[in-house]
Image (spheres, rainbow, N blue to C red):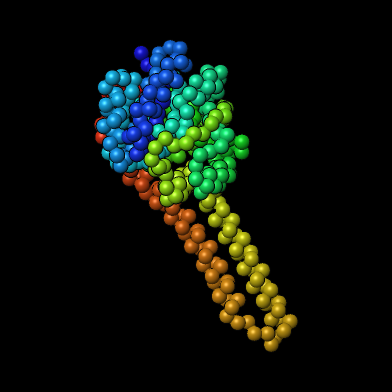
Amino acid sequence: MKPEISVVIPVYGSARILPALVERLQAALSTCTAEGGFEVILVHDHGPDNAWQVIQQLGQTRPWLKGVNLRRNAGQHNAVMAGFAHASGRFVITMDDDLQHDPDDIPRIIDSLRTGADLCYVQFESRRHALWKRAGSAFNDVVASILLNKPRDLYLSPFRGMRREICQAALEYRGPFVYVDGLLLQTTSNYTMITARHHERQDGASGYSLRKSVSLWLQMATSFSIVPLRLVSLAGVAASVLSFVFALGVIVRKLADPDMAVGWPSLIVAILFMGGLQLLALGAIGEYVGRILLNVNNRPQYVVGATSNIDATTRD
């Protein structure tokens, strides 16, 4: 029989946290599964420590604890998709592996889904992240509101729950550049939110660097929206109008004062202005063309190397 709840957790560099995480998950999930039980799917995203060995050891006495080991680092959102592909519960929860997301909040997410919501996000009273991460998150939130039509009051947290149908709809996406929240918001507008505490990381440091954060932002901007191309087009139109006005002004001044010298500064300014816009446009177009190439070449979202406690005949 399929479980009622599936919890999907990408694992990266958190081998020492996993035993405590698994114990707390078992305690929390045991209180909210009325039927069918639960499963926890730990997706090891080819991290720097021995987390995969820890997952296998923990699963030896816990048949509900399942593991997926990726052959190479795929990134958090791609690892979540790998977990989705192996989840079979009526409700699917995603969360981080560092215990900053409290397993005791899962029953509240499930209650929201049971009362009719398709998707439930957890908003935090205050976040225990570095200043640059909070600032980047705020910027990402504004951009997502513009590019994805995200409601302004919705915080896109990796601690979320959804009905199985929403998870299955997200799995229809086969491209290599995954932005899970973009897929979910394209699927449903029937969402709700709950508020919870954000806790200190129990061990180690976050695997999310500034480079990875920028890469994720680009995935959202160019894989799920054509707004950047439209902005470039509007910038081109604006530049053409400004250049025309500037040229007209020079002509009028020259006619009014034939002795006026039209020197190289105005020419250089015009060239630099138009050249910058052209490079901006080429960069945006190149980003889209590159992603098209990788999609056409069928670059995989992830590659599974091994699994633990997963029966290949029941992965659907």
- Determine if residue 194 is in view: yes
Task: Please say if 18 is above or below 297.
Answer: above
Residue 288 in the figure: left or right of residue 263: left
Residue 314 in the figure: left or right of residue 247: left
Quarter the C terminus occupies: top left
Taking depth in this image into account, of 125 and 236 the one nearest to the observer is 125
Please report the residue visible at 56 percent of the width from the left and 53 percent of the height from the top. Answer: 231
Task: Please say if 226 is above or below 96.
Answer: below
Quarter the N terminus occupies: top left
Taking depth in this image into account, of 143 and 233 the one nearest to the observer is 143
Please report the residue visible at 47 percent of the width from the left and 16 percent of the height from the top. Answer: 32
Residue 200, position in %: x, y?
47, 36
Tell which residue pokes out farthest to the bottom in this image: 259
Please report the residue visible at 41 percent of the width from the left and 24 percent of the height from the top. Answer: 24
Residue 92, position in %: x, y?
44, 25
Can you tell which quarter of the image residue 261 is in? bottom right
Please report the residue visible at 42 percent of the width from the left and 35 percent of the height from the top. Answer: 202
Residue 101, position in %: x, y?
47, 31
- Determine if residue 215 is in view: no
Can you tell which quarter of the image residue 75 is in? top left
Residue 181 in the figure: left or right of residue 195: left
